[in-house]
Amino acid sequence: MDKSYREEKNLIYTTHIREICKEMPLWFNDFIRSEADILSPLTRFNYCIDTRIFLTYLVNEHKDFYGFQIYQITPQMLGKITRKDLEIYIEYLGYYIKVLPTTAFGSSDEEDFTEREYENGEHGKARKIASLRSLYKYLYKNELIIANPAELLSTPKIHEKNIIRLTADEISRLLKAIEAGDGLTKKQKDFQRKTLKRDLAIIVLFLTTGIRVSELAGLNVSDIDFNTNSFRVIRKGGNESLLYFGEETAEVLQEYLQERQNIGTYEKTSPLFLSIQNKRIGVRSIQILVKKYAQIAVPLKKITPHKLRSTYGTMLYQNTGDIYLVADVLGHKDVNTTRRHYAAMSEENRKKAAKAIKLKQD
């Protein structure tokens, strides 16, 4: 994957950061700037979003901040916030309503307002607590406040979700849905005829390499090497890695690229996967693509690109029993992350083993 794609995404996040910082206090700009060499633009962008939510909550819900604008909030004011105040805020994040002018949604009537509901589960709250801790740590370290109540906050317990994955039969049905187009609307079939080889190549790459959706979107033609059946990818954290694929995947990719050559959209420097407009296909478009075919093939399962990645991880673990190999290929920095996800499979196998031996025959 060409690093220019990653740089392009980083520039977008940097632009968003600067826009948000315009409405924030000056000390917050210093905080975000201080993290530039430590955190990725995406993480800093999330800090901006989370802090804006927190400060908005204060001016709307906390009696000591009534009448203030966000940009007027000082570190000294935040220094008076207690742990209990922060705990009330975290509880508030579970469900809240924002009243927004309909002009934000394209209406020309400036007097109309609409309500939008927001919810945060375990993961959402945990991220916002992490943002609060970083913010208060900066303020405390730079002696802008005399106490750090955020470090006393407890992180919500994250309950591991069951892995949703495809069976061998469901994989066959998914591939058939792409190739045959049965169940698609007439409009969808018109697109399917044009994008069949591309869509098939995307799904097969997910299922045979465990690549992340953002990594797949960033691939260029030049990242593929059919001599070694491998491709270059920039993983989370910016590390470059080589992933390998089998002959079945190579065949699907070559057929797709041959079609690209035939219609004149093939260049070594161009994105590997193109949209209908012959631009790099985005993450959101890939997610919609997967959902479209999965709803036909496996309507009772909510299949996403990440679930296809889990399917690959499951198949690899079932065939090798090597949790370290699975962690390496999936790009997990900590093998315990992988072990948590796939430990249930080992338990399943041990239960099967317990039932496999019978001393008394029926």
Image (cartoon, rainbow, N blue to C red):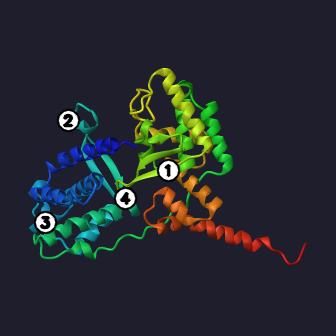
Residue topped by disc 4: 120
Is 61 located above or below residue 252 in the figure?
below
Q: CA distance from mark 3 to mark 2?
A: 30 Å
What type is the residue that disc 2 sits on? Answer: Glu
Write down the residue under mark 2. 110
At mark 2, the secondary structure is loop
Most extreme residue toward the top, as rendered? 263
Q: Residues within 10 Å of mark 4 (few under 14, many from 20)?
A: some
Q: Quadrant of residue 37?
A: bottom left
How many angstroms separate mark 1 from mark 4 (CA)? 35 Å
Q: What residue do we see at 42% from left, 29% from top? A: 267
- How packed mark 3 is, by other alpha carbons closer than 10 Å (few <14, some 14-19, many 20 or more), is few
Helix, strand or loop at mark 3: helix
x and y percentages locating residue 61 in the rendered image? 21, 61
Q: Is residue 113 left or right of residue 171?
A: left
| N-terminal-most mark, 2 or 4 | 2
- The amino acid type of the residue labelled 1 equals Leu
Residue lying furthest front in this view?
227
Q: Position of residue 130 (x, y in %)?
A: 30, 65
Give the label, 3 or 4, closer to the camera: 4
Residue under the point 61% across and 31% down: 181
CB-based contact (under 8 Å), mark 1 and mark 4: no
Given residues 34 and 242, the one toward you in this image is: 242
Q: Which mark's residue is nearer the viewer, 1 or 2?
A: 1
Q: Which residue is labeled 3 in the image?
A: 64
Which circle's residue, 1 or 4, is located before the other in the chain? 4
Question: Which label sits in the foreground, 1 or 4?
Answer: 1
Relative side of 169 to 7, left or right = right
| Residue 302 appears anywhere in the view | no
Say which label, 3 or 4, has the lower sequence index.
3
Q: Quadrant of residue 221?
A: top left
User: Residue 359 placed where, x, y %?
Assistant: 85, 78
